Amino acid sequence: MDHEEVLRLFDRQMRREVPADHPGVRVEDIGTVVRQSGGPADWNGVVFSDIDESTADAVIAEQVRHYGALGVEFEWKTYSHDRPADLGERLVRAGFVAGEPESLMIAEVAPQTGAVELAHGLRLVDATDAAGIELAAQVHDEAFGTDGSRLKQQLLDRLAHAPDSFVMTLALAGERPVSAARIEFAPGVDFAGLWGGGTVAEFRGRGIYRALVAHRARIAAARGITYLQVDAMPTSRPILERLGFEQLSVTTPYVWKA
């Protein structure tokens, strides 16, 4: 994989030309940043910036004013190859709180589509309705120990307005959901994003994560997608590296609360 070429394609398709999550939000390219704005339950934030040392502080202040007027918190999603080099430090000085860095991992779809055999009693099913989204949110709560209510509402909105933009998959042990992950699509792009992949503690280490990657890769292949993209936590990065994913950058969320 040509890292520089793929990263340029990723920046153009997934950041500079990113579409809105659903009709209830808007994406604006105002020259210095590309940002998404919506309501309190939506994902609000900056996905791309074209700034340097001389313009960064003023542009950051402008985004704080914009989202502050909307009364919502927002995220500035930075990448390690963004300019200026001290962008993260400038965001912290402006009142943002840094989240955990994640590795931008990318792989070609075709090599990821091979079958993965699950342990006896486990199976994968795609969730196609609100009940499936509810089960996925329950798994999220149990696996990550966080409140998945906001994510659930975002996915329900997408299910209502753009059902082809994602596929949610559950891993079931009998009838109990024990893992959940989704794949997200944007029209006209070469990348599909893999998100979630949380597994409840007692079922970890059984190959579910690998099976979910392969399952979603086959969904991507059926849609003609070229690359899979993951924002990987340290726990999942080694698994993805063994599968052939390569790190192209590091992404860090900086959150500003209204």
Image (cartoon, grey):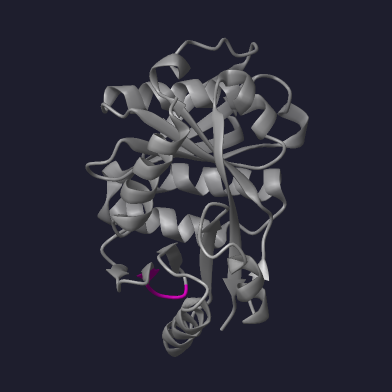
- Which residue is pictured at 26% across the width and 56% down the height? 161
- Which residue is pictured at 24% across the width and 44% down the height? 187
Q: For the C terminus, which image quadrant?
A: bottom right
User: Against 252, is 218 above or below?
Assistant: above
Please state the horizontal and vertical placement of residue 35, each as a whole percent of the image.
38, 68
Indicate yes or no whether the magenta region holds residue 38. Answer: yes
The reply to whether residue 34 is in sight is yes
User: Bounds of the magenta span?
Assistant: 36-40
Please state the horizontal and vertical placement of residue 185, each as a whole percent of the image.
33, 41
Q: For the N terminus, which image quadrant?
A: top left
Please state the horizontal and vertical placement of residue 28, each as a whole percent of the image.
29, 70
Given residues 255 and 12, the one toward you in this image is 12
Please state the horizontal and vertical placement of residue 149, each as a whole percent of the image.
55, 60
User: Against 146, is 233 above or below?
Assistant: above
- Which residue is pictured at 52% across the width and 67% down the height? 76
Indicate yes or no whether the magenta region holds residue 139. Answer: no
Given residues 139 and 26, the one toward you in this image is 26
- Residue farthest to the front? 54
Q: Is residue 138 left or right of residue 68?
A: right
User: Against 39, is 231 above or below?
Assistant: above
Magenta stretch: dominant SS? loop
Given residues 120 and 195, the one toward you in this image is 195
How many numbered marks have been drawn onto this rendered protein structure?
0
The reply to whether residue 173 is in sight is no
Asked which quadrant contains residue 190, the reply is: top left
Q: Is residue 168 left or right of residue 18?
A: right
